[in-house]
Image (tube, coloured by chain):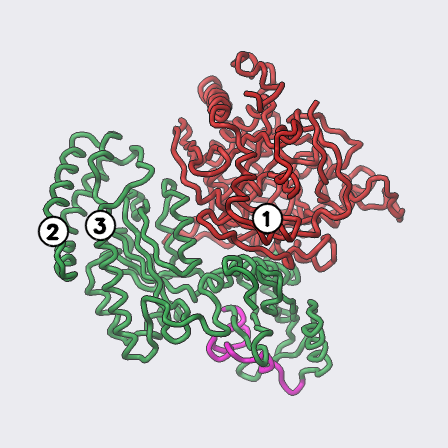
Chain colours: A green, B red
Amino acid sequence: MALIEQSLNRRYSLYVHEELDELSESFTITDPSISGHPIVFASLGFLKMSGYSKEEVIGKNGRVFQGPRTNRRSVMEIREAIREERPIQISLLNYRKDGTPFWMLFHMSPVFSKDDGSVIHFVGVQVPISPKPRRSRSGVGRNGVNLCEDGSRMRGDIVFGSCRREVCSDSLVELGPVLDLESVLDSDSRGLDIEETCEASDLEKQRAANAIENISSLLTRYSEITGRLVCERRCSLPGAGVLSSSLIISLGRIKQSFVLTDPHLPDMPIVYASDAFLRLTGYARREVLGHNCRFLSGEDTDPSTLSKMKESIRVEQACTVRILNYRKDKSSFWNYLHISPVRNASGKIAYFVGVQIEEGCKDQVRHGLSPEMRQLGAVGAVRVAVRSLSIGAGPSMS
Amino acid sequence: MLRIKRVPTVVSNYQKDESEEAARREGGCGRNCLNKCCIQGAKLPLYAFKPLNKIVGDKALPGHESSQPPVAFLDSLLLGEWEDRMQKGLFRYDVTACETKVIPGGYGFIAQLNEGRHLKKRPTEFRVDKVLQPFDGSKFNFTKVGQEEVLFQFEPSEDGEVQFIPNAPIDVENSPSVVAINVSPIEYGHVLLIPRILECLPQRIDRDSFLLALYMAAEAESPYFRLGYNSLGAFATINHLHFQAYYLAVPFPIEKAPTKKITTLDGGVKISKLLNYPVRGLIFEGGNSIEDLSNTVSDACICLQDNNIPYNVLIADCGRRIFLFPQCYAEKQALGEVNAELLDTQVNPAVWEISGHMVLKRKKDYEEASEENAWRLLAEVSLSEERFQEVSALIFEAIASVDNGNGNATQSSLEEPDAKPKSHEEVDAIHPAMVAGTKECLVLH
């Protein structure tokens, strides 16, 4: 939970919260670097629209707002956009806390680190889609017809200004009535067949794009103050040792203690460390990323064990050792360590994974599966993530 | 009788050469297999799933935290056991060393170069004009695999909670369903789900087995862990009931294809057809319960197999979306209607290929892989529009007759193993005119 609270503060100056709260749009900000890709900020507009309290939403993954009638193909398209670290605009059926569904235009866009090109956050804007005349045939009835007349009149009235600010204020004025119409429609259409798709109007699309623009420029502005700059478009190619956000999201699902090291970088540094690893060793993520694993060893670590590990890395074979390691606070523990090469989509070794089990750790046995099997499961899950998420990158990356 | 020659896939190390005499050790046949000779006293891990009535996956609703299951089914159990077998050297090759890529283009077909999968074996003749064939115990079947190739037993839980027993005796009387490795994997985690393995069921869908497969997809909780089924005549090579499954965190082209809704059934199951995809197929989604969805798809499959129409099934998105493809490639091949260039690639268009995941055997084909080539191959698999309409009508009629005619039909469950699929005669009685002729030659329609 501390990670979630820190997510915005690490990048932006403290006042960013207040500024974001002032925006009337419905939007969320998620952090792909935290396990579960949770929501780290939800706007007041979002809470109002979804009916949830802030506490119920922060820390959750956006998929919890989907329901039985949410189009699965659309869900997949969003997953793909996250994976490819690109913006997406798509109509989606979401569910409020009280279980009622509503159509909205979802516009999601990544925010990159100016420094190393990695994705820092995803901003997701939700614009409610007003009902369309042709959709009323499925039985919305008398009210539906009225609503649609309203809807079309409204759309006709709006004139795009050349100044973005104008369009925005128009949208804000309009937001109220649309929400009202929505609630009328919902009480009426509950239990009726929700249409397969619901196309957003150009205005709604524009409104979503404007909201993204606003939020992104606000975030950019507030990152300038901290010096840890973000930008809307990737300004630099991901640097050496920077994993894609989609790989980080996948690795974040794996609960075991493990690290990935990159054998193609000098001194084979850690490029990923799981939450469980940080808990086990007592270090913070930034203290281990970019460093060789040798900081885990200490004066009583057996040198022959270390050379056995080195040898298996040299010959690119898996090995399991029992090694004395040290935490940040200098306390030692016996680490039942499994190391294995991990290949990318071109079949070449991209990383080595090291999965740790603290010997004598009782709580690992209560799960019924032996610690050894869970260790191997983590290796398998890492293999699938690395292989699958390098597949789009074309031929040989390393 | 229509036959094709093809190199059968070696799914078990005990399939390599059936005349080969295994070294005899103490007790049993020496292979430590699953037959009567070796099964006494054998133990395997047992994973008992919670037979929920709803499709799981989005459990973590705000304010409704679910308790952690004792074992993460996919990430710890399945992958852990699989990795264990990999380190024991049971697979014929390291599939993660096989190069794979997304073919440039709008569809995102996935190609893999796999030169190891089809070595050694001689081509064998397969009869492709009979979708239902009786089980033949003299041929290779999964009771002959070594116990080390079996990962665990997969059963519905008796007390409604997920259970895991690391060393559970095999209850021969109850014929457990098991998950075993495929020693020629096409991706990491490639396994076979063999329902009620000791009953020696032929490759033929029934409601209970299909529901079991759906539960496995739901239990995995990952949209990237998919199950597939090939009927005889649609590139299944082993006539012993089995589903395949593997883990690849890439969307399949089929999952991205646009769809058009045809109808929603009383049970809430929505049926659509694929648009803008080289293979014509139906998609089943939704349903008031997982059983509604399962029964509808099973009945569609049963209708196809009873009418001797070969087909493939893909279970995607944790069991939420099921794709059904009637196909006619093998028949065309047997009749000499597939062009030599396509046959040369030796790609057998089974469920994974149809879904857009192409495993190529020759480096040349891999390097030259293009959307156009993939499309051309898959277009050969598809029924013609006219024939597809006909087959769809057959399916809808079968589903509707079950839906309306028999209220009990939707109540079949894992606890009622006696629920019989509709017999051939019954189906004939419903639409004799359409069935006559289909047993002869599908292509000529």
Assess disc 1: are there few (<14), some (14-19) or many (≥20) residues with their C-alpha within 10 Å of its C-alpha.
Answer: some
Residue at left offset 38%, top offset 64%: A31
Q: Is residue B138 magenta?
A: no
Q: Amino acid at mark 3?
A: Glu
Distance CA(mark 2)–CA(mark 3): 13 Å
**Which one is in front, B269 or B303?**
B303
**Residue at disc 1, secondary structure:** strand
Front in this rendered view, residue B106 or A112: B106
Which label lies toward us, 2 or 3? 2
In the image, residue B88 lies at what x, y percent?
74, 58
Where does label 3 land, which residue? A204
Task: Say yes or no: labels 2 and 3 on the same chain.
Answer: yes
The disc labelled 2 sits on which kind of residue? Val
Q: Position of residue B243 (x, y in %)?
A: 62, 39
The part of the chain drawn in magenta is A275-300
Tell me, for residue A150, which label it has, or none.
Answer: none
Q: Sequence-wise, which precedes: disc 2 or disc 3?
A: 2
The residue singled out by tag 1 in the image is B246
Which residue is pictured at 58% across the width and 37% down the height?
Answer: B212
- Secondary element under disc 2, as helix, strand or loop, is loop
Per the rendering, the mark at residue A159 is 2
Mark 3 crowd level (few <14, some 14–19, many ≥20, 10 Å Cα): many
